Image (spheres, helix red, strand yellow):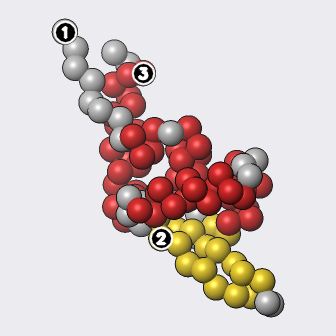
Amino acid sequence: MRTFRELDPVIHSQFRLAVISLLIGVEVAEFTWLREQTEATAGNLSVQISKLKEAGYIDVVKKFSNNYQQILCRITPPGRNKFAEYGEALKDYLNP
């Protein structure tokens, strides 16, 4: 019987996977850009970003620019590692 590696439940959520996949390809991403790319509501995106932040997979910086709050997200080195591990574990399912 073949064993499969466990998929990281933080990343395995379809929406969080989309967010971290976008962040892996950029140095930093603004909240509004992530919302546009994922077609998510601001509330849903905020919740998913919080979960990724709590897991240590992303950093979130809030600042003001021209009197508007700007939220910037960046993947952390542990987040990059977890994403790579997730990809390797997923290959077991794709190539049994």
Q: Is residue 22 visible?
A: no
Distance of label 3 from label 1 (alpha carbons): 16 Å
Residue 75 position within the rendered picture, expressed as x and y whole percent measured from the top left: 48, 64
Q: Nearer the viewer, residue 44 or 61?
A: 44
The residue indicated by pointer 1 is 1
- Label 2 and label 3: CA atoms lie apart by 30 Å
Q: Which mark is residue 94?
A: 3
Looking at the rendered structure, the kind of residue marked 2 is Asp
Q: Is residue 66 left or right of residue 79?
A: right
Q: Earlier in the sequence, mark 2 or mark 1?
A: 1
The answer to whether 65 appears left or right of 63 in the picture is right
Judge whether 45 appears above or below 4 on screen. below
Instruction: Kindly check if marks 2 and 3 are in contact, taking CB atoms under 8 A apart as contact.
Output: no
Is any atom of residue 96 visible in this view? yes
Name the outermost residue toward the top.
Answer: 1
Residue visible at 29% across and 32% down in the picture: 6
Comparing marks 3 and 1, which lies closer to the viewer?
1
Location of residue 14 in the rendering, given as x and y in whole percent from the top left corner: 56, 38
Q: Residue at x 53, y 72 (%)?
A: 60
Q: Earlier in the sequence, mark 3 or mark 1?
A: 1
| Residue pointed to by mark 2 | 59
